[in-house]
Structures are given as structure tokens and as C-alpha cells.
Amino acid sequence: MRLSKTSEYALRVLSYMVNSDQQVFTAKKLVETLDVPDKYLRRLMTDMSKKGFIRSIQGRIGGYVLAKSADTLFLIDVIDAVEGIEKYNGCIMGHDKCSDSNPCSLHKSYIPLRKQELEFLSKTSISTLKDGTIRKF
Amino acid sequence: MRLSKTSEYALRVLSYMVNSDQQVFTAKKLVETLDVPDKYLRRLMTDMSKKGFIRSIQGRIGGYVLAKSADTLFLIDVIDAVEGIEKYNGCIMGHDKCSDSNPCSLHKSYIPLRKQELEFLSKTSISTLKDGTIRKF
DNA sequence: CTTAATTACTACACAGATATAGTATTTTAT
DNA sequence: ATAAAATACTATATCTGTGTAGTAATTAAG
Ligand code: SF4
Ligand code: SF4
């Protein structure tokens, strides 16, 4: 499964935040830790705070805080927010108006996997990523 | 699962060819039937014939013919040929040097699905796409 | 009040995938 | 031979995701 860089960065940030005891994270810190392009990350953080996943604190001791319970924030929500889920609703063969009664030649083989992919994205929460033994986000 | 347009086009062409009684297909015919950009398709066809999936016949009654047995041509081969499989070997969180003993925070949840995705691509052959009832490629 | 440290905003640059245009080459039919 | 119908090649244009640069706004500390 291929995601955009943007989604990848977003997930890595949230993963890092939920796995840390810290409360507030500066962009500087995130950039250093996660090795993500500085300005790109900052814009992404602003986007995510507008979406309500995180809360931004401006000013001298500012930074970002998780704003939504990690239990109720799913991978699909993050992807949808930062790049739009539409791209993933379409499928391998690029048709629209698909259904079991209007299938392309791949439909029957692909649909079970597609179901699992969507379930994975919609049932895996950020809290799933919490794991004391992990050092890679 | 998101593929590039190029892979999508390639698969649709092969699907159409394997589902038709016809032997030789002109680019013109393919473009009309599959609604793929003309020049883009032509270049793709040349690429695929160089890879040996199809054979091109030049000249006045030319066109393209399936050159490889559909049984032994798998989705993963097509994708690898037209855009390179490397992009798909990387994963959701964008790390490299991954292993079960060097996992990121998503690894445990994702790895079973990843296995299924790779199996789908490497075990689904073009002949699987053959289905008399299908009108959508 | 001024400085320092942070986030927010806006515009631009770059690269790769996708699409288009024009010309050259190959082969068949007459 | 010549014309017609097809593929092959090369160069260029467009679009989108990604990345960079510079400036403005916010807030705490001294
Ligand atoms: S596999 Fe199914 S959902 Fe995907 S393009 Fe074909 S018909 Fe549509
Ligand atoms: S999920 Fe596994 S394979 Fe994917 S980036 Fe994380 S460690 Fe690597």
C-alpha cells in the first residue's frame, strides 16, 4: 500500500507524539527527530491543527499537542484530512461507478483484498501505534 | 491499492486483449475501446513489447498481439515492467531496512495485510481476468 | 518595551508522472 | 514505384506532489 509522503509524515508525527510522555512538541523537535523537511512539516502541522487532530500553541513556548483522543483517531481519518480519501476510494483499474453487478475483469479477485485494506485503514487507530518497545516512528 | 495511471492502462489493455477473440489489436482500436490517451498508450505499447508481454507488428496491417502466455504473466510483472516495483516494496510509513526485529510502530498491525497485498499481485495472472460475462476492462 | 522563540502565511522552485505534437520508419496494397 | 495504414521515436507541455524561502504574527521572558 502506497501512501503519499504527506500522509506518511502525518502518521509518523502522530505516532511519535502518542508514543512519547512529552506533552508539547515544537516543530523543531519533530523535524530533528523524524527527519522530515522543516517547512513542509510546519505546513502539515498547521493543516492538522485546523482539522482538530492536534492543537497548536503559538508564541515563545509554543508547539503542538495531541488534541483528539488517539482511540478515536483512525488512519483513514488522517489520510482523508491531509490528502483526501477519494484517491483511495478509486481502485486499481481506475473505473468509477463500480459495483458487484457492474464489475471489471479484476473485480472478483480484488474485492476481498480491497475490503481488508479499507478495514485496516478504518479500524486501526493511532492508539494502536502505542508500544513501549518501539524506537522507530 | 493505488497504482499509477501507467500500470492501470497496461492492465486494462492486457485484460481487454485476453478477453477478446481477436488476435491483432491496433493502437487505434485500443484507444477507442479503452479510452486511454492515444500517444501515451502507443508509447506504453512499445514499452510492453520491449518487455516481451506483447509483440508488435509494424506496417500497414500491423498492431499488437499477446506474446506471453496469460497464465504466466502476473500483475506484479506488469507493474514492475511499466513503472518499477520498488515503489511498492517500500511501505506505508516510508522506512527502509525494515524487519520484524526492527519494526516501526505500525509494523505489527500492517504486516499481515502487506503479505496479502504482495500475494495478490504476485499470484493473480492475466488469465485470471478472462471472463465471458465481462464488458468492462 | 524590547527581545527571543515559536507558529502562520504566502509565494515560488523542483521533479516526476502524465499527456500532446510532429516526424520518421515499416510494411502492405495497388 | 507510390500511396496508405500502421508502429517507433523524440521533443515538449502540463499537472500535481513535494520541497524551499522569506516574511508576518503571536506570546513569554527579561
Ligand atoms: S476491481 Fe471492481 S472496484 Fe476496482 S475498478 Fe474493477 S470493478 Fe471497479
Ligand atoms: S510497517 Fe513495517 S515494513 Fe512498514 S515502514 Fe513500518 S517497519 Fe517498515
Image (cartoon, coloured by chain):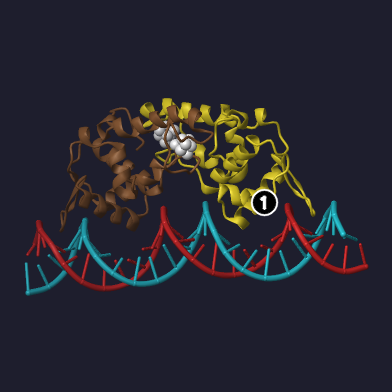
Chain colours: A yellow, B brown, C red, D cyan
Q: Nearer the viewer, residue B69 or A78?
A: A78
Q: How many marks?
A: 1
Q: Could you tell me which quadrant the N terminus of chain A lies in?
A: top left
Mark 1 within 8 Å of ligand 2, using the beta carbon: no
Q: Residue shown at 51%/46% (left/top)?
A: A4
Look at the picture and state if A103 lies above or below B6.
Answer: above
Q: Is residue A98 visible?
A: yes
- Quarter occupied by residue A67: top right
Q: Could you tell me which quadrant the C terminus of chain A lies in?
A: top right
**Mark 1 belongs to which amino acid?**
Ala
What secondary structure is found at the residue carrying circle 1?
A: helix
Residue, disc 1:
A27
Q: Residue shown at 34%/38% (left/top)?
A: B137
Q: Residue shown at 29%/55% (left/top)?
A: B42
Q: Residue shown at 34%/44% (left/top)?
A: B85
Look at the picture and state if B89 lies above or below B125.
Answer: below
Dot 1, how many residues are within 10 Å of its Cα: few (below 14), some (14-19), or many (20+)?
some
Look at the picture and state if A77 lies above or below A34.
Answer: above
